[in-house]
Image (cartoon, rainbow, N blue to C red):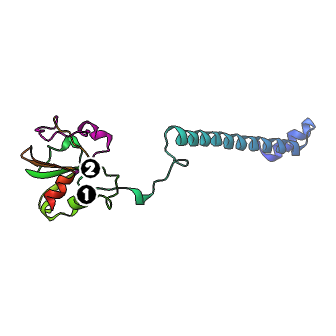
Amino acid sequence: MGRELRRKQAKKDGKSLEKIELKEENQIKKYIINIIAIVSIFAIIYLISALFITKELDWFGKKENSNNINEVANTILASEAFNQSETSYYVYFYDFDEDEKESDITNLVNNDSNLAESKVYKVNTKSALNNNYVASESNKNAKTIDDLNVVNHTLIKIEDDKITAYYEGNEITNFLS
């Protein structure tokens, strides 16, 4: 209906045009309020699920300091110790979390000129994925990965998928000096 027709109809019915226009405005306001309420409910549901269920948003989590991240080159799992492409290489087992400045053996392995000619792979002894190969007593006579038991700070030389040298603790220092 056009405005003029509404006015005529309102005059016939004994109603004023202002009341009809106010009712229409109120209905529009109700629709807008309903839409805003529905959008707000969906936004709240999304935020709750993103924060607590999917952890997509991490407002309450701990922020890691980029200075504390330990990145070690040539890192492998202990189970991959015999599966490297080189025919001769070293595998050094140690705890990545210990301070390298305090560990003379780790510094010696990282900076030794004798080892610079060979590839040195590093295995984290504190990783849960390597727990099967870390023990309180080592097995220096290991021939396969199934027999391998190492302690912290162990250096082994592997040639043609066989252990040819096995050093641990101070033996590494003696070998490299």
The tally of labels here is 2
User: Which residue occupies 15% across, 52% down?
Assistant: 90
Query: What residue is disc 2 on?
Result: 94
Q: Residue at x 17, y 44 (%)?
A: 81
Say whether residue 138 is magenta: yes
Residue type at tag 1: Thr
Q: Which residue is mark 1?
A: 106
Amino acid type, residue under disc 2 in the picture: Tyr
Q: Identify the image quadrant of residue 42.
A: top right
Residues at circles 2 and 1 in contact by the CB criterion of under 8 Å:
yes
Number of other residues with Cα within 10 Å of mark 2, as a class: few under 14, some 14 to 19, many 20 or more: many
Find residue 10 and report its horizontal and vertical position in percent: 88, 40
Q: Quadrant of the C terminus?
A: bottom left
* First to last magenta residue range: 122-146
Q: Which mark is residue 160?
A: none
As measured in the structure, the alpha-carbon distance from the residue carrying label 2 to the one carrying label 1 is 8 Å
Quadrant where the N terminus lies?
top right
Sequence-wise first label, 2 or 1: 2
> For the point 32% across and 43% down, which residue is it?
127
Q: Position of residue 165 (x, y in %)?
A: 10, 48
Residue 170 image offset from top left, x and y in percent? 20, 53
Answer above or below: position of 67 versus 80. below
